[in-house]
């Protein structure tokens, strides 16, 4: 598998908590979208790990094609 699975063609709104560490699913196989559940094991994919700088609503990428890993940049509109 060299391309991620498209988990959705629109972003998913999530509430991020300041200081909390998150792991965004990059492979598209996670059952806990948009976050990683370890389904990528055995593939070349690794999750994008980040710490939320502040508490806010974020729009997480589900198409896995974003140029800003983890966050929607509108790329899904071109799929």
Image (cartoon, rainbow, N blue to C red):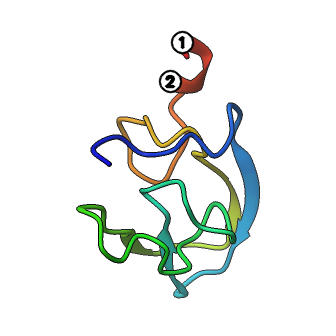
**Could you tell me which secondary element the residue under label 1 belongs to?**
helix
Percent across and percent down for residue 69 are 39, 50
User: How many other residues sit within 10 Å of disc 2, few (<14), some (14-19) or many (≥20)?
Assistant: some
Residue 52 in view of the camera: no
- What residue appears at the point 43 percent right and 35 percent down from the top-left corner? 65
Say which of 40 and 20 sits in front. Answer: 40
Q: CA distance from mark 2 to mark 1?
A: 6 Å
- What residue appears at the point 74 percent right and 62 percent down from the top-left corner? 14
Residue 28 in view of the camera: yes
Residue furthest top as drawn:
78
Find residue 61 and report its image quarter: top right
Please tell me whether residue 57 is drawn above or below residue 23 in the rendered image: above
Say which of 68 and 46 sits in front. Answer: 46
Q: Is residue 1 left or right of residue 7?
A: left
Please tell me whether residue 2 is drawn above or below residue 37 in the rendered image: above
Checking the image for residue 75, the label placed there is 2
Q: Is residue 7 left or right of residue 43?
A: right
Percent across and percent down for residue 19 are 52, 87
Q: How many marks?
A: 2
Percent across and percent down for residue 44 are 23, 62
Percent across and percent down for residue 54 are 58, 72
- What residue appears at the point 61 percent right and 45 percent down from the top-left corner? 62
Find residue 6 and report its image quarter: top right
The quarter in which the C terminus is drawn is top right
Residue furthest left as drawn:
44
| Cβ–Cβ under 8 Å for marks 2 and 1 | yes
Circle 1 is placed at which residue position?
A: 78
**Could you tell me which secondary element the residue under label 2 belongs to?**
helix
User: How many other residues sit within 10 Å of disc 1, few (<14), some (14-19) or many (≥20)?
Assistant: few
Q: Is residue 76 left or right of residue 40?
A: right
């Amino acid at each position: 598998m060299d391309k991620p699975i498209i988990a959705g063609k629109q972003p998913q709104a999530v509430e991020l908590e300041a200081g909390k560490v998150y792991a965004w699913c990059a492979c598209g196989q996670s059952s806990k979208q948009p976050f990683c559940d370890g389904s990528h094991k055995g593939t070349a994919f690794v999750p994008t790990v980040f710490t939320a700088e502040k508490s806010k609503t974020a729009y997480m990428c589900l198409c896995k094609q974003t140029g800003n890993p983890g966050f929607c940049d509108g790329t899904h509109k071109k799929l």
